[in-house]
């Protein structure tokens, strides 16, 4: 019999055994809104199955195990032969295999593919975000490879396959492959044009040997990589396979794995190329233009991934507050806690709504939508990924000391939260990219303003924000030093427009009052009086299965 002093009361049951997709009203409504009727029922069934898996005790165990047992580098076998392999815990392979089977690398060739994939990515990475990197890179490699039809015909069926096969073998012997990317080098970082990796063409054409060092190589256990190197004609893009067609290992020396703040279950590496065989992707001297299609797709995944982290953090905070009692009642019923939870829920819903709108633009693939994406993707990448750490940190605080304990899962979310703001170009890179589009691509700005203008007249605070934005856009003098301010305003106006058109009135009203109307403090939980906050919180609740 347990001592009476150890009787456990007022502890919150774990949020487990629920459908992550069905419980997310913002996400389910976005899927219904953006998918054509012909694929909607099938997509709902797929996402519901994935949602139940993501909310299961099994998937939660896999996530914790993968994070607690990070990958290990094995450079040599027992006989001294160089093998350069990365070993993962079985839970990592189970998470990755489930994701590939669910089609999370397959978007480009099926109707509504980007919306379906983005929704699935948002659902499944809530179990563990670390394995999202190879999923993202594999998915995003497709448009870059399509610049070379012969490479695309060879690799695209394997990249978009729903079969996961771990281990290094010739691609011709596998039913599915994964891709990584190597762009940055230690002397340049984001300034990839300063890369020093050399690409020497072999006689006969179509083949090169690479020599150099990549400071960050994503997903080094992958079957192939897109990398940048200096060819005779300038900086160029190359495909580097890990295993050559004859079965021999390519020269791909993994020097070390990065010891990262978060994202512990995923491997990021430094690699050396020394006579590494590669094939060109696109023309010599056009490497950045070739690989930028891959970068744009991975930037969207950064938005989706941050939306997933926010959603899981908010779901945990509301769940905790709905069961924890203090001062004579449930926390969720306390006016101040309700204000905090509603504020967090607004940020989460705005992120999800924007992420799925961008995915839908990829599916539409019209000139108008491509122009819209040119500005909307970097603006969303800048703002949504920056909001992630703030949201997760505040949500953790809602759990009090329990949230600071590893067993809650909240510390893992908090360590992961800054990542998407850094990968694929940090905040300044995104802000400058938006500025570049504003100065050079008038059609992109026109498409952005047309999208925002669809809600004009629906709310006086949005109208005032649009007017202020137009004033700022009319004078881009000294624009670089105020680029962050401008891009933040663009992202907020876009989110406000989307919520006014598609979210319930209580959500749109609270967002416009705080984010656009200026009636908001400097921390979460400072929404103005008079809003319908209980409805906002209830909408964001993750229902138990």
Image (spheres, rainbow, N blue to C red):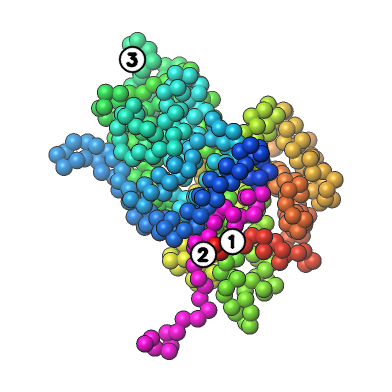
Under circle 2, the secondary element is: loop
Q: Is 108 left or right of 360, judged from the image as shown?
A: left
Q: Is 531 left or right of 88, judged from the image as shown?
A: right
Q: Nearer the viewer, residue 191 or 518?
A: 518
Point out the frontmost of discs 1 and 3.
Answer: 1
Residue 210 circle label: none
Tell me if mark 3 has few (under 14), some (14-19) or many (20+) residues whose alpha carbon lies within 10 angstroms of its own.
Answer: few
Q: Residue beneath label 1, please?
A: 542
* Image: 315 above or below 400: above
- Residue at 46 percent across and 23 percent down: it is 152
Residue 48, image x, y percentages = 55, 50
Classified by dominant secondary structure, the portion drawn in magenta counts as: loop
* Label whose residue precedes the other's in the sequence (2 or 3): 2
Q: Residue beneath label 3, please?
A: 202
Tell me if mark 1 has few (under 14), some (14-19) or many (20+) residues whose alpha carbon lies within 10 angstroms of its own.
Answer: many
Residue 119, image x, y percentages = 57, 45
Q: Nearer the viewer, residue 215 or 495?
A: 495
Gap between marks 1 and 3, in whole Å? Answer: 58 Å
**Figure quadrant of residue 138:** top left
Asked if the stretch drawn in magenta spans residue 447, the answer is: no
Gap between marks 1 and 2, in whole Å? Answer: 8 Å
Q: Residue beneath label 2, please?
A: 15
- Residue at 62 percent across and 42 percent down: it is 40
């Amino acid at each position: 019999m347990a001592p009476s002093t150890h009787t456990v009361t007022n502890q919150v049951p774990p949020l487990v055994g629920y459908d992550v997709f069905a419980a997310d009203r913002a996400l389910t409504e976005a899927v219904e809104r953006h998918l054509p009727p012909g694929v909607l029922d099938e997509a709902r069934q797929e996402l519901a199955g994935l949602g139940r898996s993501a909310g299961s005790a099994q998937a939660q165990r896999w996530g914790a195990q993968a994070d607690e047992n990070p990958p290990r580098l094995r450079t040599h076998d027992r006989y001294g032969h160089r093998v350069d392999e990365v070993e993962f815990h079985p839970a990592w392979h189970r998470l990755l295999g489930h994701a590939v089977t669910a089609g999370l690398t397959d978007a480009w060739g099926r109707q509504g593919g980007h919306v379906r994939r983005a929704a699935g990515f948002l659902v499944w990475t809530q179990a563990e975000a670390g394995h999202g990197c190879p999923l993202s890179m594999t998915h995003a490699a497709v448009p870059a490879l399509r610049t070379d039809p012969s490479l695309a015909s060879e690799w695209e069926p394997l990249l978009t396959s729903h079969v996961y096969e771990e281990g290094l073998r010739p691609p011709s012997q596998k039913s599915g492959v994964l891709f990584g990317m190597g762009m940055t080098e230690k002397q340049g970082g984001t300034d990839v044009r300063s890369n020093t990796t050399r690409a020497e063409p072999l006689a006969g054409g179509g083949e090169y040997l690479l020599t150099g060092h990549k400071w960050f190589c994503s997903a080094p256990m992958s079957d192939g990589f897109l990398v940048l190197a200096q060819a005779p004609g300038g900086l160029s893009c190359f495909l580097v396979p890990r295993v050559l067609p004859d079965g021999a290992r390519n020269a791909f020396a993994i020097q070390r794995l990065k010891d990262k703040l978060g994202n512990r279950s995923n491997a990021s590496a430094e690699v050396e190329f020394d006579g590494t065989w590669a094939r060109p992707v696109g023309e010599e001297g056009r490497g950045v233009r070739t690989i930028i299609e891959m970068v744009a797709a991975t930037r969207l995944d950064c938005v989706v991934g941050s939306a997933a982290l926010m959603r899981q953090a908010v779901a945990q905070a509301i769940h905790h507050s709905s069961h924890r009692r203090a001062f004579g009642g449930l926390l969720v019923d306390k006016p101040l806690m309700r204000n905090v939870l509603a504020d967090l829920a607004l940020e989460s819903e705005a992120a999800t709504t924007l992420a799925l709108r961008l995915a839908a633009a990829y599916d539409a693939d019209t000139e108008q939508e491509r122009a819209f994406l040119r500005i909307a993707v970097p603006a969303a990448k800048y703002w949504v990924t920056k909001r992630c750490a703030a949201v997760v940190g505040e949500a953790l605080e809602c759990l009090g000391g329990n949230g600071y304990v590893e067993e809650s899962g909240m510390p893992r979310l908090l360590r992961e939260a800054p990542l998407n703001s850094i990968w694929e170009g940090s905040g300044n890179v995104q802000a400058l990219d938006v500025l570049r589009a504003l100065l050079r691509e008038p059609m992109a700005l026109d498409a952005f303003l047309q999208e925002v203008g669809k809600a004009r007249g629906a709310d006086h605070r949005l109208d005032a924000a649009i007017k202020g934005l137009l004033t700022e856009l009319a004078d881009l003098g000294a624009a670089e030093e105020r680029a962050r301010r401008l891009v933040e305003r663009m992202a907020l106006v876009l989110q406000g427009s989307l919520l006014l058109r598609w979210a319930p009135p209580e959500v749109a009203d609270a967002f416009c009052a705080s984010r656009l109307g200026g009636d908001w403090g400097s921390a979460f939980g400072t929404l103005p009086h008079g809003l319908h906050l209980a409805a906002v919180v209830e909408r964001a609740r993750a229902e138990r299965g």
